Image: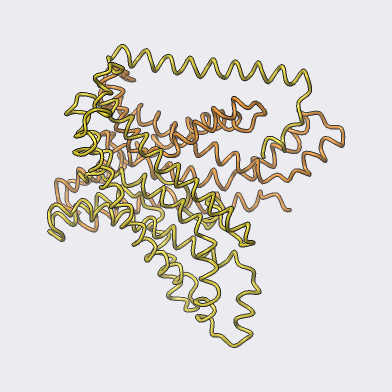
Amino acid sequence: MSASVLFDAPGPRARRRHALLAAVGLLVFLGLLFLVYRKMRDANQLHADMWKPFLTDRSVWRDYLLHGLWGTLKAALISIVLAGVFGLLFGIGRLSTVAAVRWVSSVVVEFFRAVPVLIMMIFAFGLYTSNGVFANDVNPLAAVVTGLTLYNGSVVAELVRSGVYSLPRGQGEAGLAIGLTPSQVLRSIQLPQALTAMLPALIGQFVTVLKDSALGTAITYGELLSWSKILGSNFANTVPAYIVAAILFILMNYSLSRLAVYVESRLSRRGRTTLHEAAAVPAPAAAGPQT
Amino acid sequence: MGNGLTISTLLSAFGSTVLLAALSAIGALVLGTVVAVLRVSPVRVLQLLGTWYVNVFRNTPLTLLMVSSILGATFILGINLDPTSIKGNAFRWAVVMLSVYHGAFVCEALRSGVNTIPDGQAEAARSMGLTFGQSMQHVLLPQAFRGAIAPLGSVLIALIKNTTVAAVIGVSEAANLMQVTIENEGSGLSIFLVFALGFVILTLPLGLWLTSLSRRLAVKR
């Protein structure tokens, strides 16, 4: 779409130039690929023994990668549910008619959006282990979920708020005109529409949660990255293990992003307004794509 | 606060956070601009290469890139960016990986800037008789950059926070110092608040300034 704004339809000379540019681009890409290939070959990483276990050895999947995937999905699912609750609570708080509630919610949301997730995870992990808050083997999971919930919950709170703001003013005014109280208007008119509008952005946020769960490796949580590290040292195929882990992450996240695009196009076909990820969180301070 | 954490160690840790963020921001801007040019170019092959880059690096966890830069690239493939010191190698790899990862987001921010331009702007410029170069220089690019300020600001703030991920490969920045401090003295709320406050100071004023800048420079439509 952007190409059509910037460029005219090419004539014969431009088409020749484009073919040349395409060839140059392809050559540069193949050159880079060759450099990677040579490095891997010199380090003996392309040997069939390095890659075969992924296809032939069932324990690679059963004892390592599936454990890792389960750890990643478990942390991400718990976090996104809790973040939804947190976000709804503080998002409504920021829309409250009571100034004190609005103010407290704003401070909480802005604070947790400005603090890096890893900092929160490390603190929560230290707190839980030194006080024995959970069982020893649950502490890492709890810390990961805490960090992910606080950050992503704040982002969801912003989504809720901007979802309500994105509705036509007439929606709220009509509700007030028929005699509903402001909180009734919010609950039965604005929120249902806002939640539908923010659905694509929420699915997009799940990608962030999945990626950020890999930070759990810093506090000994057994997710996909940690398990592929162990796999790499047990099978002496570190580089292939990381590449496979990256491919698994990319497959999960890419299909989620496609789902978000699909849901958005479905909603807008039905004439609903939707929130784009980029436009969704315009408020001052720290938003944007996290890890 | 215990006596393990002094003002000078704190300042030097946040100093390397800032240095890491500044160098990676430059790297990400350069890489992201190149990829954005590929993605908006009229050449199909270049567009595909750009799209491929964005999809790969936007969907890979930064933590995985960081960890594999040391355990994979340095130890196995033998790509050492600073043979004289382990810390130096880790720092340089952190800059490379932060740039590569955020380059994908910079590309998308620039592209969304281009997408804010209505078709009519380009058509009007061409029908006035401006050449391709002139319409780019005077009409399209100024609008594209103004539209890209807000999303670029979000990327910059995310980058500052993501420098903490370099702690997993032992770069001595803020999160690393926090981890060491907690290991030595236990996890106190005051330690968390000190580090959290450091990041609030780094990101909040910057975010406010960038938002006001993008509002002031927004193209009125």
Q: Which image quadrant for residue A214?
A: top left
Relative to B147, is B14 on the left or the right? Answer: left
Tell me how many marks there are: 0
The foreground one among B8 and B47 is: B47
Q: Nearer the viewer, residue A256 or A101?
A: A256
The quadrant of the picture occupied by the N terminus of chain A is: top right
Residue A176 relative to residue B219: left or right: left
User: In this image, A235 relative to A267: left or right?
Assistant: left
- Give the x, y percent position of residue B128: 87, 36
- The quadrant of the picture occupied by the C terminus of chain A is top left
Depth check, front residue: A43 or A115: A43
Identity of the residue drawn at 64% across and 80% down: A174
For residue A282, above or below residue A72: below
Chain represented in orange: B
Answer with the quarter of the image where residue B125 lies: top right
Where residue A232 sits: x, y (%)? Answer: 22, 29
State the residue at coordinates (55%, 40%): B108
Question: Which quadrant holds residue A239?
Answer: top left
Q: Position of residue B118 (x, y in %)?
A: 73, 46
x and y, in percent, of residue A287 in the image: 47, 52
Q: Residue at x 87, y 32 (%)?
A: B129
Q: Which chain is yellow?
A: A
Q: Residue furthest bottom?
A: A179
